[in-house]
Image (spheres, rainbow, N blue to C red):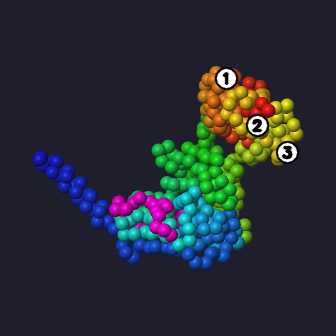
Amino acid sequence: MSSSTFILLLLSFQLFSSISQAVVPASQTFTYVNEGDFGDYIVEYDANYRALPPFNNPFQLCFYNTTPNAFTLALRMGTVRSESLMRWVWEANRGNPVRENATLTFGTDGNLVLADADGRVVWQTNTANKGVVGFQVLPTGNMVLHDGKGNYLWQSFDSPTDTLLVGQTLRAGGPNKLVSRLSEVSNVDGPYNTDEGFLYYLTFEYFTTNPTSSSNRNMALSRYNNTLSYLRLGIDGNLRFYTYNPNVQGVAWELVYTFLDRDSMEGECQLPGRCGNFGLCEDSQCVACPTPNGLSGWSKDCDVKKVASCKASDFGYYKLGGVDHFMIKYTRGDQTKQSDCESKCTKDCKCMGYFYHTDNSRCWIAYDLKTLTRVGNSTHLAYIKTPNK
């Protein structure tokens, strides 16, 4: 064995040895049990909650639930001295709830583990024996596990749900999307997600694919210090930016910016649920219900006729001209012949219709229709499945 190889092996051994010997001091370990009385203050989604000791004003770790005995481990933003709503800005186990007497444990091996009452591991940081020596909730709302030099070996900023705090990013090769919550009651993933953007110093960068472009949107400045702010992908699919002033007793939250509203470049017609299950939107207004016999007056009850059969002989399509689906602006679609586009939808039982641009031969398959947008271009067509009987 050469001397250089020996030195390399020695260095590798010393590095492994130093990591394996790094342990969390016993005084810094903890086990918190989901039990006891609920908190007294108003929180988002009208939830019940139990606050845990990890705290850094205005962020606190909690168990909360919106349905009986189905708890989420989450970070709350807001203070008890304010009468304003306290909001959930990070969640560990959305869609995989724990029950009463679940535990959150931080052991000497440096792993943070959420386990249900029966011991089933629901969520963990996977940092056992990787050099973790401490746990912190930072003033930014980032919850971190760090080594002896202060390097983050795990951080909550790398696993967002529907919310970004100031300084938190979405990026290729890392945390790359936000996913909406289904409803205020049901804490599972909703139908909307957004990716490849970042929030930093009140700037939001986003990308569209039709036409291909990118943009930096400078959000309006608020009356408050913007350090305590967040961007939320809401239940309705809209992006909203809120900022918080912990010194205000009443209205501590300010809605600073809404991505899709009547005054924005995109308008409210880009919101999938703006006009219900199947409405036509123009200039942010719901103007009609598309039917096989043409357009009728809009109502909240307008809907598409359901196709119950997968047999091509049992359904057909009706055509709408000068309309787009909400997905078209933000997805590229496939370049193909219209006959192939229709064939793809026909063979797919879940396809509810297809959208086709004859000017550039682009095809979009729709699995959810919701709001359609009226456009001035007659080459933008929609073909909606409808039963023959």
Of 371 and 150, which appears nearest the observer?
371
Residue 350: which disc? none
Q: Position of residue 56 (x, y in %)?
A: 54, 70
Outermost residue on the right side: it is 297
Mark 1–mark 2 CB contact (< 8 Å): no
Which residues lie in the magenta part?
117-142
Q: Is residue 144 above or below residue 388?
A: below
Look at mark 2 in the image and give the residue it sits on. Answer: 373
Q: Is residue 236 left or right of residue 374?
A: left
Check residue 115 for magenta coloring: no
Q: Do the residues bearing badges 3 and 1 touch, measured as CB atoms within 8 Å?
A: no
Asked if residue 78 can be seen in this view, the reply is no
Q: CA distance from mark 3 to mark 1?
A: 31 Å
Tell me: residue 5, above or below residue 253: above
Residue 299 numbered mark, or none: 3
- Distance between the Cα atoms at labels 1 and 2? 21 Å
**Position of residue 325 measured from the top left corner of the image (x, y, whole percent):** 71, 36
Question: Residue at horizontal 53%, vertical 47%?
Answer: 176
